[in-house]
Image (cartoon, helix red, strand yellow):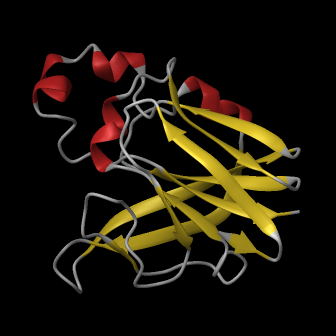
């Protein structure tokens, strides 16, 4: 997909699931495997590239690679991370917490459920690697793993050319 000549290619998930590329706009689905639609998106990010992940990939450990992709320009990568998690994954500590937030509706329109903070990091052109969503402490909790991470959310990614 191109966005002002930005190309994002070779999106690979370590889970083997197909991640999709789309635009970050209200009404668009957040994940490939869920019917959750974005509600509020800050004007500064509307229309930028969006990598739709799979909701069940939320159980990938923070220390393990989750996905890689390549860009042909320097970019800001924004990780849309659910505020519900009690602690950030270690790798996300290298990102700047922005003042932006995004909301989304569940599969029932009008039911506002997801509230996501945005964390930003600059990257040069080339390959970008992101790690798992779940902190090791959460994965050590039997209830969390046995429930499939119920009521917690996988992150998705917005990419904007610098």
Q: Tell me: 70 left or right of 30.
A: right
Measured as percent of width and height from the top left, residue 108 is found at 16, 79
Residue found 57% across the figure and 46% down from its top:
11
Instruction: Give the farthest residue toward the top.
Output: 140
Residue at the front extreme, as displayed = 10
Screen quadrant of the C terminus: bottom right
Numbered circles on residues, count = 0
Location of residue 67 (image quadrant): top right
Q: Residue at x 48, y 80 (%)?
A: 40
Q: Could you say where residue 32 lies in the image, as x and y percent from the top left?
A: 34, 59
Q: From what the image shows, is residue 46 above or below residue 155?
A: below
Where residue 136 appears, as percent x and y from the top left, is 40, 16
Q: Residue at x 32, y 23 (%)?
A: 138
Vertical position of residue 98 compared to residue 92: above or below = below
Q: Position of residue 70 (x, y in %)?
A: 72, 45
Task: Report the side of 38 relative to 101 (left or right).
Answer: left
67 vs 100, nearest the viewer:
67
């Amino acid at each position: 997909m191109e966005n002002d000549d930005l190309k994002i290619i070779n999106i690979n998930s370590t889970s083997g699931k197909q991640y999709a590329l789309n635009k970050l706009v209200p009404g668009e689905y957040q994940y490939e495997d869920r019917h959750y639609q974005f509600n509020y998106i800050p004007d500064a990010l509307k229309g930028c590239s969006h990598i739709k992940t799979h909701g069940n990939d939320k159980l990938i450990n923070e220390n393990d690679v989750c996905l890689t992709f390549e860009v042909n320009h320097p970019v800001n990568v924004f990780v849309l991370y659910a505020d519900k998690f009690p602690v950030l994954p270690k790798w996300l500590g290298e990102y700047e917490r922005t003042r932006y937030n995004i909301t989304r509706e569940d599969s029932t329109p009008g039911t506002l459920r997801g509230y996501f903070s945005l964390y930003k990091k600059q990257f040069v052109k080339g390959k970008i690697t992101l790690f798992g969503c779940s902190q090791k402490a959460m994965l050590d909790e039997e209830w969390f793993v046995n429930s499939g991470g119920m009521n917690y959310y996988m992150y998705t990614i917005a990419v904007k050319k610098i």
